[in-house]
Image (spheres, rainbow, N blue to C red):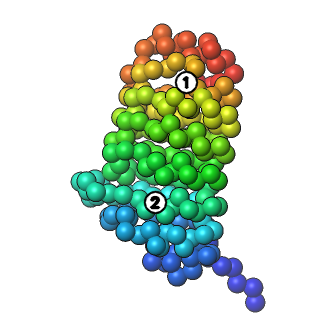
Amino acid sequence: MFLLKKTKFSSLNDAIQNPKNCKKLSLLFIEYNLKDKGAIFSQFINLKTLEIQADPSIYNLDDFELPKEIASLKKLKKIWLLNLPFRTFPEWLTQIKSLKYLMVRGNEIDSIPDSICQLNNLKTLRIENCRLDKLPTTLNQMQNLRSLGLSDTGLKDLNPNLFPKNLKEINLSGRQKYKRHDLEKLKSAMKKTRI
């Protein structure tokens, strides 16, 4: 009889039982800090998709961190980090060269490090529902980036020179702080991009 191996997990305890089989890990509504779980995460050598969403009960954790060991996972392609109490963008994320999709949503970050341009394979970047008020000067170097989500941010500068020319779409929906004139200027400069 042929048995399928489980590859999708929704708890660290279950995933650690078969760490090499874990390809998708969805930790939804976590109620604890993950900063001391690095040794566990480093065992998920075949992980391709990581979803982490916080329960509101951890929003008051000033010392919340994700384990930096996640950056060592060479097969990781997609990451969703939702409603985590970040105050700064976890710069180690820029070391995950295999990433194609990154969403960081619902936090307190106000900037993205210039090292974001190191994610050469990234096709979708969504930094949303946060205090982001400026783009990194290196964003325009991300020539493989096709979709950029910046909804519900504090972004003010829509200088077309900040954006990669190969973008197919930019999502600027929600409460924005940019000027309408700047939006029209961006649309005019990036005619092939859906804005």
Point out residue 101 in the picture as x, y percentages from the top left corner.
Answer: 59, 47
Residue under the point 46% across and 33% down:
151
Name the kind of residue labelled 1 in the image. Leu
Of residue 53 and residue 35, the one placed in the foreground of this image is: 35
Return the residue at label 2. Answer: 68
Indicate whether 19 appears above or below 56. below
Return the residue at label 1. Answer: 162
Point out residue 99 in the picture as x, y percentages from the top left corner.
Answer: 61, 51
Of residue 135 and residue 102, the one placed in the foreground of this image is: 135
Regarding mark 2 in the picture, which secondary structure is present there? helix
Q: CA distance from mark 1 to mark 2?
A: 28 Å
Question: In the displayed image of the protein, which residue is found farthest to the top?
Answer: 181
Of residue 149 and residue 143, the one placed in the foreground of this image is: 143
Among the 4 quarters of the image, the one containing residue 27: bottom left
Name the kind of residue labelled 2 in the image. Lys
Indicate whether 20 appears above or below 157. below
